[in-house]
Image: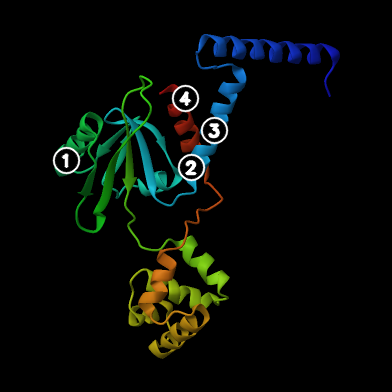
Amino acid sequence: MFYASELNFANAISGTANASRQASLREGAPYSGPERRTEQASSVRWMAAMLDEVDYGMLLLSGEDQILHVNHAGRAELDASHPLQLVGRQVRARCSKDVSPLANALRAATQRGLRKLLNMGEGAHRASVSVVPLAVPDDGSGPVTLLMLGKRQACEGLSVQGFASSHGLTLAETRVLAGLCHGKPPTEIAAQVGVKIATVRTQIGTIRMKTGAPSIRALVQQVAVLPPMMGALRSSSEARYTAWSDCVTATA
């Protein structure tokens, strides 16, 4: 509830903002009053929340290596085994052989507007990274580059669970589905779960019947093309990283 003085103050602010807006319009300059700044800040928060729901890791860089923002999937992907690592406010290649290709790709993106797909890491820790220059209005802020991290598995766990729930699969059938989506043959799934191979084959048949998939390949494809499903809960460490990222974004 407003008191009279608060109402007068609010009206004064509103009147000042309106006058500034009208003066800016008369002079041909873009209006940047308090409500416009509030609207922009709100848009930034919504954009960050939207990016957190995408299950591809994304890093937004200013210049050639300065981090502006990292989405939730990106923070989850950049573990100790990923070829990329975060060092302060910079992104770095973990392996010495990747240092030069990454630097060259970032330089080509910022200076020449070229895209590049990098294959980084070694052995089981190999991962692909797409370097994408972003076309933004020339506002003097400098070049911005997007790094998109390739997936290291075809089907995410939450996508498998959501798909299984929507088709009425049992817990045992869901485990079999998860194994298939991770490329495991029925024999390996049977050994891992501790049942006979005949049981797994029966469960696969039931899964195909419930989902209408004509084959195992078609079944996995159904899960692979699902829209992303990110976890609603964040750990305490994730919350701390989010606060750090917000600070980086605010001070960049």
* Residue under label 1: 101
Q: Percent from the top left, x then y, of residue 74?
A: 39, 45
Mark 1 crowdedness (10 Å alpha carbons): few <14, some 14-19, many ≥20 = some
First in sequence: mark 4 vs mark 2 = 2
Q: Amino acid at mark 1?
A: Pro
Q: CA distance from mark 4 to mark 2?
A: 18 Å
Q: Amino acid at mark 3?
A: Ser
Would residue 179 be visible to someone looking at this image?
no
First in sequence: mark 1 vs mark 3 = 3
Mark 2 vs 1: CB contact within 8 A? no
Q: CA distance from mark 4 to mark 1?
A: 30 Å
* Residue under label 3: 43
User: SS at mark 1?
Assistant: helix
Please identify, in this view, whether the residue under mark 1 or under mark 3 is nearer the observer.
Answer: 3
Mark 4 crowdedness (10 Å alpha carbons): few <14, some 14-19, many ≥20 = few
31 up-or-down from 131: above or below = above
Q: Amino acid at mark 4?
A: Ala
First in sequence: mark 4 vs mark 1 = 1
